[in-house]
Amino acid sequence: MDDIENSVKKIYADLNGTATFVCPHCGNVRKEQAALYKDVKGPIAIECNCGQTYSVQVEFRKFYRKETRLEGIYATASSPSDWIKVTVKNVSLEGCGFETVGKDMLQKGVEIKLEFKLDDAKRSLIRKRALVLSVFGRYVGCKFKELPGAFDPDLGFYLRK
């Protein structure tokens, strides 16, 4: 098996609910309604007209999520001076996912302060208030708490690259 067959590519549903599948073998492009895959857990196998099959994971996020490995820290509202180290694993305009160093006691619904530096040329410091949406072992998913219409230009530029 080659690397193409072993990898699972993430594709994102657009604002119209359309997913665009591109065959890594022949380049054939096919569009479908992403809602067909909304309840599917894990990757799906797509069979191309060229006879090859490839795996994709359909994402239904509003914003692109970039995979990262950034050092950061967080503190809870109840213990604002106790900063805990984390590794930010992915980030989007609306939120991020991070891993704690050890077993963490965060729970869904907790508000945190989060700081991390981007690995861009400016080493931009990102400071956000966030709400914990999910906790799976050491992995925490959170949504940034922003004022309506707020936009972070450093984060926006970073996600475009």
Image (spheres, grey):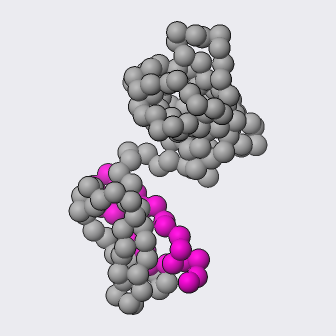
| Percent of width and height locating residue 127 | 61, 24
Q: Nearer the viewer, residue 90 or 42?
A: 42
Q: Residue furthest bottom?
A: 50
Residue 64 x, y percent position in the rendering: 47, 49
Give how far across and how far down residue 105 sits, in percent. Answer: 52, 24
In this rendering, is residue 93 above or below 16? above
User: Viewed as shown, does residue 21 lie left or right of 89?
Assistant: left
Which of the pair 60/54 is nearer the observer?
A: 54
Magenta segment includes 22: yes
Magenta-tinted stretch: 1-24
61 to 138, vertically: above or below:
below
Residue 90 appears in the picture as rendered: yes
Q: Residue at x 56, y 84 (%)?
A: 1
Tell me where residue 41 sits by quadrant.
bottom left
Residue at the image point whose x is 36% and y is 83% from the top = 48
Q: Within the image, what quadrant is residue 63 found in?
A: top left
* Residue found at x 58% / y 31%: 103
Tally of marks: 0
113 vs 78: above or below: below
98 to 35, vertically: above or below: above
Out of 111 and 65, give the one closest to the viewer.
111
Give the percent coordinates (x, y) of residue 104: 56, 27
Residue 96 visible (yes or no): no
Q: Quadrant of residue 146?
A: top left
